[in-house]
């Protein structure tokens, strides 16, 4: 229609006057260069559109074209081991054709349509298919088997099936006739709107932990598969590096890393690491089971908002195949800032600190797409969401952090002071919490040790006591404390430096299995109890510290290899021998 032209431009927000062509949340193409946009507001006079690309050189009077579909992503083989921007444009392909800087209106297929994939059909002529059923298998990488599922809206009898072999993304490999005698084609890909969650058959109570190999997480503040966690922290507290460590070592099948509004050098570092790091689970490259969505701080602000939805939609697609997926979002604060900027240009009434009043709703819509589920094809899969939060000035009372706490069950609060002391991961054990312990009791008792959670609670109690005593030490010094309180302080120091602190660059300390974590706790608690016993017999505490037994025990995280846990017996014997010698 002639009326469907740009009336006004305000950054990424444009308006079209006097039109009834568009529908809410519809994808449109804006201007002569066909910039991708989305309808976000409709009134009797104006239709408002947010554009996901830079609007430089866009002019009033240029056409706006309707597509009659929502913002969607292409789902099919080629997603894994790929790098996309916030609206699923492949950055590698664009770099090959246009160089290092992305041109406006890049019209590039999301997935490689010319590559041939080895396809194994799992259906026969005459079968009846419904939504979500697996009809073919494609080895996408050496690690990930891509399971092609029937798209939504297709249900019926299989009329034709091609033989197994190599096919391209849009090749028809089967046809289905529905109850209205309409023929539908099944290819190697499908489209899905990013703001519409994929349906599931049933949500399951999650009782399996997501093992990360990081002691402070796995022991103190564990997260389940299908759970949600937030990593809040100020600048320089180690959010990004902690997320990288989780992505490298967690036992999820697939990693979706969303760099949302972060600095370009951090995204580049992540791309380089994931592309070169050997995956400990498979001995292949980590990128072979990773999807990277890069939306840096200098990219269009509206696309920053879309990147979160793109990442979670891709995660849901692989979850429905039966995989356990971890979504690493870095950071949701930058995403919230994009919401605030768009809201300001729409002249909406601001809420706290200028954020829109629907901030909490958008956060809940994102985090509630996590979960452990039974798929419509009878399999089980999960999405675990771990989102970084970047409060200005490390102020955890700001709106994004406070609203995030309402929707996550793990809160890993990073402490800037710990980071300055080179204590990594810099998770503050007094401010952090997890709500998943009751769900994991049976798993820990069955797979680790029946005393594991009891040991954990003793550690937490000792650290809480140490924190109280340190307040007294600041006032009067440690010399005036009774010996049993000096022991608590020394044990707390050992827990902090010998257990909670972890070296990401040490081959034995970068990832620690739960069985070793439990044995480390047992050794420290054994030393504490034995020391307390001889203090009761009148031995001075300085005589214990003079043996350097506490310092020796802090080295066990390096000296005991992950597959040589029997060496802990030597530490128990050493504790008995050393303490017996000073009685």
Image (spheres, rainbow, N blue to C red):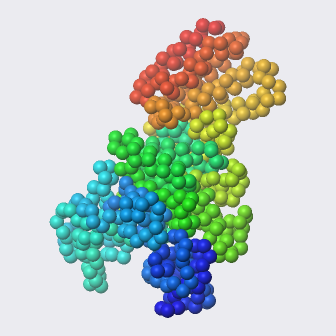
* 159 relative to 242 in the view: left or right: left
In the image, is residue 254 above or below residue 510?
Answer: below
207 or 521, nearer to the observer? 521
399 or 235, nearer to the observer? 235
Q: Residue furthest right?
A: 476
508 or 155, nearer to the observer? 508
For image coordinates 54% across by 77% down, the residue present is 58
Quadrant of the image occupied by residue 94? bottom left
282 or 260, nearer to the observer? 260
* 345 relative to 227 in the view: left or right: right
For image coordinates 65% across by 37% down, the residue present is 420
Q: Position of residue 279 (x, y in %)?
A: 38, 42
For image coordinates 28% across by 78% down, the residue present is 184
Label total for image: 0
In the image, is residue 238 above or below residue 257?
Answer: above
Using the rendered image of the protein, determine whether residue 205 is visible from the camera's viewpoint: no
Q: Position of residue 416 (x, y in %)?
A: 66, 42
**Dividing the image into 4 quarters, which one contains the C terminus?**
top right
Using the rendered image of the protein, determine whether residue 110 is visible from the camera's viewpoint: yes
Q: Position of residue 129 (x, y in %)?
A: 29, 71
In the image, is residue 78 above or below residue 280?
Answer: below
Q: Position of residue 298 (x, y in %)?
A: 56, 61
In the image, is residue 69 above or below residue 528?
Answer: below
* 322 relative to 1 in the view: left or right: left
Q: Residue furthest left?
A: 163
For image coordinates 61% across by 35% down, the residue present is 423
């Amino acid at each position: 229609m002639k009326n469907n032209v740009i009336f006004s431009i305000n950054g990424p927000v444009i308006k079209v006057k006097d039109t009834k062509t568009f529908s809410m949340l519809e994808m449109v193409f804006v201007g002569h260069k066909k910039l991708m946009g989305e309808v976000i507001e409709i009134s009797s006079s104006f239709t408002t559109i947010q554009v996901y690309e830079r609007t430089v050189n866009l002019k009033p009077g240029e056409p706006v074209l309707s597509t009659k579909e929502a913002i969607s992503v292409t789902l099919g083989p080629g997603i894994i081991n790929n790098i996309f921007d916030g609206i699923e444009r492949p950055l590698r392909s664009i770099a090959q054709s246009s160089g290092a800087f992305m041109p406006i209106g890049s019209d590039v297929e999301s997935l490689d349509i010319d590559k041939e994939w080895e396809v194994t059909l799992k259906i026969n002529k005459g079968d009846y298919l419904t939504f979500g059923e697996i009809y073919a298998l494609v080895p996408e990488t050496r690690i990930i088997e891509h399971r092609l599922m029937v798209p939504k809206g297709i249900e019926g009898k299989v009329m034709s099936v091609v033989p197994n072999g190599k096919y391209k993304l849009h090749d028809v490999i089967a046809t289905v006739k529905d109850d209205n005698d309409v023929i539908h084609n099944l290819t190697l890909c499908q489209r899905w709107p990013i703001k519409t969650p994929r349906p599931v058959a049933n949500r399951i109570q999650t009782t399996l932990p997501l093992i990360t190999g990081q002691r402070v997480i796995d022991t103190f503040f564990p997260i389940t598969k299908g759970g949600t966690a937030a990593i809040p922290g100020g600048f320089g507290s180690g959010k990004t590096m902690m997320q990288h460590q989780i992505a490298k070592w967690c036992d999820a099948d697939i990693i979706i890393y969303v760099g949302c509004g972060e600095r370009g050098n951090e995204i580049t570092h992540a791309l380089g690491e994931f592309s070169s790091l050997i995956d400990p689970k498979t001995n292949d490259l980590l990128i072979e089971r990773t999807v990277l969505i890069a939306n840096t701080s200098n990219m269009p602000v509206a696309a920053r908002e879309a990147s979160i939805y793109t990442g979670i939609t891709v995660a849901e697609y692989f979850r429905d195949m039966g995989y356990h997926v971890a979504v690493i979002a870095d950071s949701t604060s930058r995403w919230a800032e994009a919401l605030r900027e768009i809201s300001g240009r729409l002249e909406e009434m601001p809420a706290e600190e200028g954020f829109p009043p629907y901030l909490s709703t958008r956060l809940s819509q994102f985090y509630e797409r996590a979960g452990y589920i039974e798929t419509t094809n009878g399999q089980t899969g999960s999405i675990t969401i771990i989102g970084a939060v970047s409060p200005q000035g490390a102020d955890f009372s700001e709106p994004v952090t406070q609203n995030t706490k309402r929707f996550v069950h793990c809160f890993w609060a990073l402490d800037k002071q710990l980071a300055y002391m080179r204590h990594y991961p810099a998770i503050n054990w007094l401010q952090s919490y997890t709500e998943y312990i009751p769900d994991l009791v049976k798993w820990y008792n069955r797979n680790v040790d029946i005393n594991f959670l009891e040991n954990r609670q003793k550690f937490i109690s000792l650290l809480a006591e140490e924190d109280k005593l340190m307040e007294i030490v600041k006032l009067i010094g440690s010399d005036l404390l009774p010996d049993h309180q000096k022991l608590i302080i020394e044990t707390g120091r050992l827990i902090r430096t010998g257990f909670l602190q972890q070296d990401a660059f040490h081959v034995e300390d970068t990832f620690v299995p739960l069985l070793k974590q439990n044995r480390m706790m047992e050794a420290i608690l054994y030393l504490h109890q034995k020391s307390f016993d001889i203090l009761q017999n009148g031995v001075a505490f300085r005589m214990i510290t003079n043996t350097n037994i506490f310092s020796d025990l802090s080295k066990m995280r390096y000296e005991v290899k992950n597959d040589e846990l029997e060496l802990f017996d030597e530490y128990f014997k050493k504790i008995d021998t050393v303490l017996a010698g000073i009685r």
